Image (cartoon, helix red, strand yellow):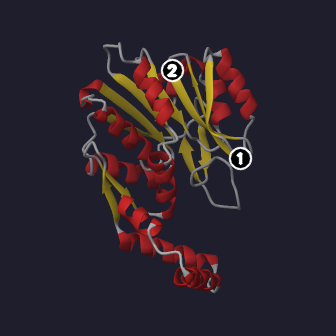
Amino acid sequence: MQKERAAVSNMPRGSGYSLLMKLLRVSRGLFPASVRARVRILLFRWLDLTWELPSGLHLRVASYGDWIIYNEIFVRGEYDQANSIAVGSAADNDSPLHIVDLGANVGFFTLHAVDRLRQRGRASEEFMITAVEGNERCIKEFQARVFAENGLSRSVRLIHGLVGERTGVATFYDNTLFNEGGRSGVRVPYVDLSSLFASSPHIDLLKCDIEGAELLFIENYTDVLRKVRVAVFELHDDKCDTQQCRSLLSKLGFTHQAVLRPGSPCSIYCAWR
């Protein structure tokens, strides 16, 4: 993937390039969005984009959505600071480092965390990652990429379910609890995080990207958050009260805060003790 980016950046920017871009823009406008989406899917399948990370892990980018997340995590390094703070604060801890990935999607954050830990010299038995994801399609992709393609089943566990309420079932619309655009949804149970982490004395790093349900999670799981040393959230100010999220985290003892990616409606916010 780095080679593809280098190839694009090194393309000549003369009149021929400008003409090509104009032709592509005109051609794009000739086709409806549904056709363009289908062509994009076929192109990513044909390209079969894969890459080997410095630690030996393998990445696969299978869609435009994957490409966006790949760039956010691996190129822009939006979670690097949170990861560094968590690993640094746990340097003197003899117990395995524990990372929680809420809203795990297809596993890019998990793979990035493992890659960083391996580069710091941590063996597989020196860390544990718990990933939670509500989308069944993403669950299957996570299993393929993290377990089948990278053999991480001993140090990563995956839970299928929603995050927010402590119990019950909700209608899940692709990747959110909010019905945007009249989409059909599926019924998915909530995961009881208090029970899931009852035996965990601490959580070194918690990443939460649950598409607007972050306030619900913070309000319902103060017991879990009190175990967390570093928390990093994708906050959605169009779907919940993100100022209240920050206030509650401060009250829970997260005395340090940083905005890792400013913006609206989504920003990345890190809080640590």
Amino acid type, label 2: Val
**x and y percent of residue 44 in the render?**
42, 69
Q: Please say if 15 is above or below 156.
A: below
Amino acid type, label 1: Pro
**x and y percent of residue 31 in the render?**
61, 84
Camera-near label (2 vs 1) is 1
Pointer 2 or 1: first along the chain = 2
- Would residue 191 be visible to someone looking at this image? no
Disc 2 target residue: 228
Quarter of the figure with the N terminus: bottom left
Secondary structure beneath label 2? strand
189 left or right of 52? right
Q: Residues within 10 Å of mark 2 (few under 14, many from 20)?
A: many
- Quadrant position of residue 216: top right
Mark drawn on residue 265 = 1
Q: Residues within 10 Å of mark 1 (few under 14, many from 20)?
A: few
Taking the spot 71% from the left edge, 61% from the top edge, the residue there is 181
- Would residue 90 be visible to someone looking at this image? yes
Secondary structure beneath label 1? loop
Taking the spot 65% from the left edge, 82% from the top edge, the residue there is 29
* 36 vs 2, nearest the viewer: 2
- Quadrant position of residue 203: top left
Mark drawn on residue 7 = none
Q: Please say if 190 is above or below 257.
A: below
In space, the residues marked 2 and 1 are separated at their CA atoms by: 26 Å
